[in-house]
Amino acid sequence: MLVETLRWQRSLSLMTFNLLAPCYFRHGGRVESKDKTSFLARAQAAIQAIKHEQCDIVCLQEFWFNREYQRAFRQAFQPTHYLHTAKRPGNKEDGLAMFVDKRKFEVHYVENVDLVEDAGDRVALLMHVATKWNRNSMRLPQRSFIVVNSHLTFPHTHMYASLRLNQIDRVLAAIRKYVARQKLHDVPVLLCGDFNDYDDPVYRLVTKNGFASMFAHLHGREARITHCNHNNREVGVDFIFGARLQAPATDGETLATSTLRRHAELTLSDDDQPEINELRLQLEPVDCYLVPKRLPRRDHRPLVATFGMMHGESSRQKTKVPSLDNVQALTAGMKARVEDTIPIDIATDGLTS
């Protein structure tokens, strides 16, 4: 149980936004990347939309690795934000970008998580962030939280289900390994990005590993439409998940708050983890919303979550980190169930082996 001395101190806002890379966007019968005027104009529209929300942390997907395109974002954000990018492997022209407000936060570690071999040609960005205003009075672990930006493969057919589970499994394993290596067992974790599907085995695996969707937590349901895909279907595929946020208990606890509390820790496993009683950063979800439809020629809407940032005594219950073996077993079980539903002629393609 959290002590009553918990107090608000600052706020945090996080945006996830798939930009629709010019190398993939066709209009007027041609790829936009061939039209400098067009792709720079759309880049500036995206920049202005991002700036309008004034978010502390921005996680971008389909960030195009073109020199002029990158320069536009660098000129707009480098004076106020730390900028980190990760390009997809091989000949892919896009990747991920993360911008962190340097006036409020420090970036202590960045890891490019390669989702290759049996996990396709995707990447994820893992970032260890710490509050800056209290660095003279609190140790680094007490000011820390982790943010992960990801973009999973689109499920073109059933045979991609296993591939997508491999991808999210690698993301979760990267979080777990870094948390264990740095002894950050009690810090909040935010996982966001374009998951390219909804209510699927990936979503269920994420929530089974202790994460809760911020939009569902605050609104009682997921955002219905965040993306119009290439099949002209309007779907909700962009998410901001949180784990170990530890919302303070209230006398009249709502169902949504109760749900978040059940996801306050990553999945339990080992019994030999020590108690963690020291002061640590805590995030209280305040709002989660879609940016209004005002952006030209784009297939995703930005999703924003805001949090209150506070310090108080950590839960006196044991906080345990799941063993890699347990989580891998969970993933393997889900993959087996998925593959059991795939017709034999599709499964023999090799992607699900």
Image (cartoon, rainbow, N blue to C red):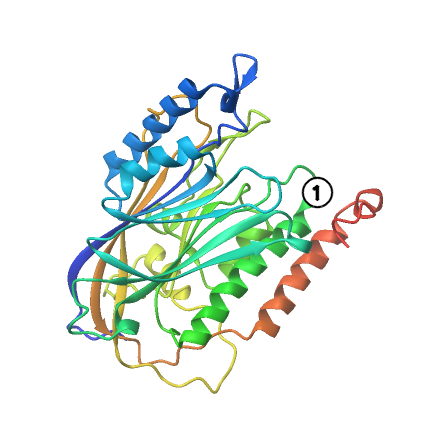
Q: Which amino acid does label 1 sit on?
A: His
Q: In which quarter of the image is residue 297?
A: top left
Secondary structure type for disc 1: loop
Identify which residue, 52 or 158, lies in the foreground: 52
Q: Is residue 174 visible?
A: yes
Q: Which percent across, then down, holds residue 143?
A: 26, 68
Q: Is residue 209 visible?
A: no
Q: Which percent across, then down, holds residue 332?
A: 67, 63
Instruction: Kindly identify the residue that appears in the image at 38 percent across and 73 percent down.
Output: 184
The quarter of the image holding the N terminus is bottom left
**Residue occupied by mark 1:** 158
Instruction: Kindly identify the residue that appears in the image at 34 percent across and 69 percent down.
Output: 187
Instruction: Kindly identify the residue that appears in the image at 66 percent across and 48 percent down.
Output: 161
Q: Quadrant of residue 318?
A: bottom left
Q: Residue furthest front?
A: 67
The quarter of the image holding the C terminus is bottom right
Tell me the crowding category of disc 1: few under 14, some 14 to 19, or many 20 or more residues within 10 angstroms, Cα based.
some
Q: Which percent across, then down, holds residue 127?
A: 39, 59
Q: Which percent across, then down, holds residue 209?
A: 50, 63
Seen in the image, is 287 located left or right of residue 164?
left
The vertical placement of 281 against 92, above or below, is below
Seen in the image, is 218 located left or right of residue 60?
left
